[in-house]
Amino acid sequence: MFELYTSGDILNIVLAVSIAIIAIMLAWGMFYITMMLRGAFRVVRDIESILKDAKDAITLAKAKAEAGTYLLKTFSKGVKDVIGVFEKKLTKETKKKKVTKKKK
C-alpha cells in the first residue's frame, strides 16, 4: 500500500489527514452557522409579520375611532339642534300660556 521510507513521509501523511479533518470541521462549522443565521432570519421575518399585522390593526382602530368621533360629533350637533328647536317651541308655548292667563 504506502511505503514509508522516512519520517518525512509519515509527517506528510499526518499533515494531509490533519488538513482534511480541519477542512471537514470548518465545513461543518460554516453549515451550522448558516443554519443558525437561517433560523434567526425566519424569526426576524415572523416578528416583522407580527409587527406589520399589529400596525395594521392599530391603523384600523385609529380610523374607526376617528370615524366614531366624527359620527359622535355630528350626532351631538344634531341632538343639540333638535333640543334648540324644542326649547324654542316650549318657550313660545309658555309665553302663550302666560299671555292667555293675563287676559282672563
Image (cartoon, helix red, strand yellow):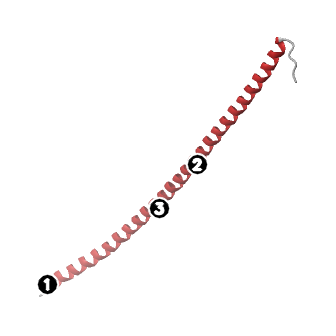
Q: Secondary structure at mark 1?
A: helix
Question: Which one is in front, 45 or 51?
Answer: 45
Which amino acid, mark 2?
A: Asp
Question: Which one is in front, 102 or 53?
Answer: 53
Mark found first going from the N terminus, 3 or 2: 2
Q: Is residue 83 above or below residue 8?
A: below
Q: Which residue is rendered at x = 83% and y = 12% of the image?
A: 8
Give the mark toward the camera: 1 or 3. 3
Mark found first going from the N terminus, 1 or 2: 2
**The quadrant where residue 76 appears:** bottom left
Which amino acid, mark 1?
A: Lys
Which amino acid, mark 3?
A: Lys
Mark found first going from the N terminus, 1 or 3: 3
Q: Is residue 102 above or below residue 5?
A: below
Q: CA distance from mark 3 to mark 2?
A: 27 Å
* Residue named by callout 1: 101
Question: Which one is in front, 69 or 36?
Answer: 36
| Label 3 Cα neighbours within 10 Å, binned few <14 / some 14-19 / many ≥20 | few
Q: Secondary structure at mark 3?
A: helix
Q: Give the quadrant of the N terminus.
A: top right
* Residue named by callout 3: 64
